[in-house]
Image: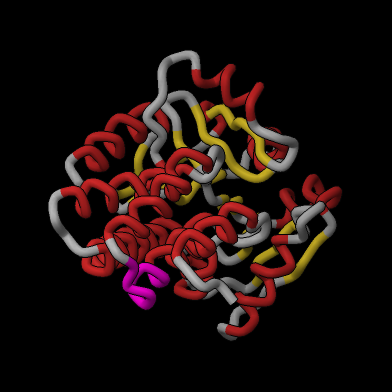
């Protein structure tokens, strides 16, 4: 059992299975429940903001919490504000997703995502195929969570993606980081976007302003070189749309719109 907030932060950084939104909510709930001192909270948040690479939401939320604490807001109050903001963003994203995807019945996705869970729970799908997402098997975790909500979910081998893509109405994926020219997500996402193009199927990425990375124009190359084999860069050119709290956005404008919204927060 974690005895202090820094231990919580380290455990979060070591988690390779949970979705990024789930992890950041775990951090915020720990700040609320443990009520650390500003110094303890700042150390934990700095540990997160300087260590995390692929899950940008952790860095963005940690940085925003730090700013609030520096202004005199208590750590638990800062966490409560951030948790409320995150929940609001997710709720609106799901509402937008239901409106856009409500006429679809068969979906394909991969990995584990709190946003995807809430989206498929709100929709009325006849089938949700979820790739296993090895080596971590995150897809199996998402499938189990969807089934607990009374919705149909089928775990499928990763190598069956080309078959399943022809059976579904669309592909919906999560995001770990959004950049101007593309996004980072679980390995296999890029293959799904290519398959969608080949089979004339739409592919959507659900995201929020909290997953926008502040990066330079050369970040595409940097990301490809830096991220390990579990994550990959996906060009947004093959993406149909982003589903966000600002609405359904074209890939060409999503980064700018979401970044502006992020900078106006906190």
Q: Does the magenta-highlighted stretch encompass residue 144?
A: no
Whole-percent x, y for residue 225 in the image: 66, 22
Left or right? Give the position of 117 relative to 212. right
Whole-percent x, y for residue 98 in the image: 41, 64
Q: Is residue 88 visible?
A: no
At x 43%, y 43%, the residue is 49
Q: Is residue 261 visible?
A: yes
How was this image coloured? secondary structure
The N terminus lies in quadrant = bottom right
Residue 153's quadrant in the figure?
bottom right
Left or right? Give the position of 46 relative to 221. left
Q: Does the magenta-highlighted stretch encompass residue 35?
A: yes
At x 84%, y 52%, the residue is 160
Whole-percent x, y for residue 255 in the image: 36, 32
Picture layout, residue 224 above or below residue 105: above
Name the main secondary structure of what is drawn in magenta.
helix
At x 39%, y 38%, the residue is 212
Residue range highlighted in magenta? 29-36
Left or right? Give the position of 198 relative to 101. right
């Amino acid at each position: 059992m974690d005895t202090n907030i820094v231990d919580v932060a380290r455990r979060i950084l070591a988690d390779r299975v949970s979705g990024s939104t789930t992890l950041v909510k775990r951090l915020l709930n720990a700040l609320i429940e443990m009520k650390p001192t500003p110094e303890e909270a700042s150390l934990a948040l700095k540990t997160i903001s300087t260590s995390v690479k692929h899950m940008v939401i952790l860095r963005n939320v940690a940085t925003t919490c730090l700013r609030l604490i520096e202004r005199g807001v208590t750590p638990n109050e800062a966490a409560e504000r951030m948790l409320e903001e995150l929940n609001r963003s997710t709720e609106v994203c799901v509402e937008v997703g239901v409106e856009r995807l409500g006429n679809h019945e068969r979906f394909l996705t991969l990995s584990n995502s709190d946003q995807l869970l809430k989206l498929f729970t709100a929709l009325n799908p006849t089938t949700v195929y979820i790739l296993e997402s090895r080596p971590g098997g995150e897809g199996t975790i998402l499938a189990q969570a969807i089934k607990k909500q009374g919705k149909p979910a089928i775990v499928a081998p990763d190598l069956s993606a080309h078959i399943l893509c022809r059976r579904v109405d669309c592909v919906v994926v999560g995001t770990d980081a959004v950049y101007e020219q593309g996004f980072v997500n679980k390995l296999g996402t890029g293959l799904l976007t290519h398959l969608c193009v080949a089979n004339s199927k739409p592919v959507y990425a659900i995201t929020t302003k909290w997953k926008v990375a502040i990066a330079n124009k050369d970040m595409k190359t940097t990301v490809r070189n830096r991220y390990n084999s579990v994550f990959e860069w996906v060009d947004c050119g093959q993406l149909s749309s982003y589903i966000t709290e600002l609405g359904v956005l074209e890939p060409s404008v999503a980064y700018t719109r979401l970044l502006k919204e992020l900078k106006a927060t906190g």
